[in-house]
């Protein structure tokens, strides 16, 4: 018997003739994640198997696998030959260990069996019945409860036999990259990392653009964004962050444009710059953390204006969520505590007292024409640096300036 990790995928089962493409993409993601554990990955029928992971590394490997988009669930399992005596003995051992983990001397259980190998001598129901009887005879303190058991012993008969008691839910969704690539407008707040997570879950590979306004925003604010990308990259893989120097644009807007339009005009410039970077990086969409009605720049009318100034589609996965829902998801993906660090981003600089909430596109564009927009955007792009954020939190590599 050998310890290993059983990996299940969900939605890509439905992909018909395109299914091999999605399975290959998911396998590549699993192999890349498994390298840090020196694990060996193999594809089975409707499963992936992660073998040769050291026992002490199995909990960390399970956590890493559960974060991979496309994986439905994972289980630490024992793999063995398809021999009934060996299977029953392993099932009894698994039941004992589970009772110990639960801290119970008396408990209820049931056996759940799946038999993919139709040549195996017992069908699923017979296997469950015989294994359950063996466990009752060899593990004191147990009773069968098929409706509300304290735990379940799972048996699977596939290429080998597998025995386990735990199913850890994965992130689900689609393998990253299978739906193309998007440019995430990543601020230092709560919303945008969650938006990136949600689109990556649908198979979008991410790059990110961040606008910083030194000296009005600090280097700590910049580092906060890098940390957010690092945390997000534990689900998506390494993320390139394009750091755009935004101070000159903000100052020009502040000096020449109507005060009530400041936030929205700033947003227009952000969208245009993000689109230019996105097209240069072969991204097919922009992604924002906007939620309808949350702030003045996120009213129906304001969103219509920012949509109108770019050609790429704009994905807003949080559009119908309220703040509490977004915060809960941020906590679950481990970005919340970083997002609430008290380092301001450029969106908090030069905030108007009474921002326009029902803007007209022609009026906004008239104000934009007061500026030398092409030169401002070109200068900002020339000062942009690109940093790669890795999930290990060890390094940020500047790859261009």
Image: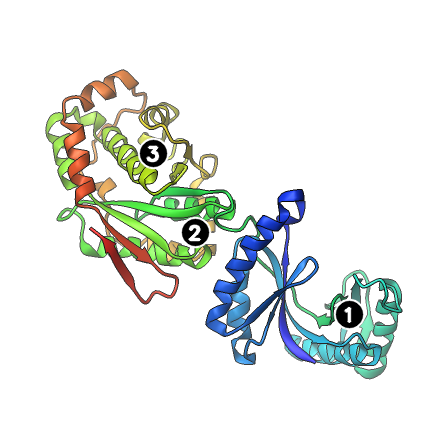
Q: Identify the residue under disc 2.
A: 330
Q: Is residue 130 left or right of residue 168?
A: right
From the top left corner, tell me how far across and down residue 398 is, in percent: 24, 57
Q: What label sits on residue 295 in the rendered view?
A: 3
Q: What label sits on residue 242 in the rendered view?
A: none
Marks 3 and 2, how far apart in space? 19 Å
Marks 3 and 1, how far apart in space? 52 Å
Q: Earlier in the sequence, mark 1 or mark 2?
A: 1
From the top left corner, tell me how far across and down residue 328 is, in percent: 47, 50
From the top left corner, tell me how far across and down residue 334 is, in percent: 42, 58
Q: Does the CB distance between marks 1 and 2 fall below 8 Å?
A: no
Q: Identify the residue under disc 1.
A: 109
Marks 1 and 2, how far apart in space? 36 Å
The crowd level at tag 1 (other Cα within 10 Å; few <14, some 14-19, many 20+) is many
In the rendered image, is residue 333 in sight? yes
Q: Is residue 366 left or right of residue 144?
A: left
Total numbered circles: 3
The crowd level at tag 2 (other Cα within 10 Å; few <14, some 14-19, many 20+) is many
Q: Which residue: 41% across, 56% down?
A: 233
Q: Earlier in the sequence, mark 3 or mark 2?
A: 3
From the top left corner, tell me how far across and down residue 61 is, in percent: 52, 69
**Image quadrant assignment for residue 81:** bottom right
In the rendered image, is residue 67 in sight? no
Q: Which residue: 56% across, 48% down?
A: 173
């Amino acid at each position: 018997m050998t310890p290993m990790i059983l990996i299940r995928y969900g939605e890509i089962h439905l992909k018909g003739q395109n299914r091999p493409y999605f399975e290959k993409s998911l396998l590549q993601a699993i192999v890349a994640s498994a390298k840090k554990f020196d694990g060996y990955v193999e594809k089975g029928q409707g499963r992936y198997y992660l073998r040769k992971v050291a026992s002490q590394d199995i909990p960390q490997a399970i956590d890493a696998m559960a974060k991979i988009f496309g994986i439905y669930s994972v289980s630490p399992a024992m793999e063995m030959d398809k021999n009934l005596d060996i299977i029953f003995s392993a099932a009894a051992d698994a039941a004992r260990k589970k009772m110990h983990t639960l801290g119970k001397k008396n408990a209820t259980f049931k056996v759940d069996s799946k038999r993919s190998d139709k040549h195996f001598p017992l069908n699923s129901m017979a296997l469950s019945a015989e294994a359950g009887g063996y466990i009752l005879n060899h593990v004191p303190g147990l009773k069968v409860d098929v409706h509300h058991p304290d735990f379940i012993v799972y048996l699977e008969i596939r290429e080998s036999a597998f025995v386990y008691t735990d199913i850890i839910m994965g992130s689900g969704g689609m393998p990253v990259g299978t739906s193309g690539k998007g440019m995430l407008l990543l601020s230092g707040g709560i919303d945008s990392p969650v938006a990136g997570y949600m689109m990556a879950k649908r198979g979008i590979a991410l790059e990110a653009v961040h606008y910083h306004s030194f000296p009005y925003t600090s280097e700590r604010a910049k580092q906060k964004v890098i940390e957010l990308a690092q945390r997000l990259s534990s689900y998506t893989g390494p993320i390139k962050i394009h750091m755009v120097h935004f101070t000159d644009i903000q100052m020009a807007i502040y000096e020449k444009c109507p005060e009530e339009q400041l936030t929205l005009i700033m947003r227009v410039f952000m969208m245009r710059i993000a689109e230019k970077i996105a097209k240069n990086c072969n991204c097919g969409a922009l992604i924002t953390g906007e939620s309808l009605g949350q702030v003045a720049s996120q009213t129906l009318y304001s969103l219509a204006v920012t949509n109108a100034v770019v050609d790429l589609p704009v994905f807003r996965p949080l559009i119908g969520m309220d703040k509490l829902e977004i915060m809960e998801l941020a906590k679950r993906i481990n970005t919340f505590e970083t997002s609430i660090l008290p380092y301001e981003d450029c969106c908090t600089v030069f905030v108007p007292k009474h921002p326009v909430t029902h803007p007209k596109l022609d009026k906004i564009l008239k104000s934009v024409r007061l500026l030398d927009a092409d030169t401002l955007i070109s200068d900002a792009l020339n000062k942009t640096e690109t940093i790669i954020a890795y999930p290990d939190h060890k390094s940020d590599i500047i790859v261009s300036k």
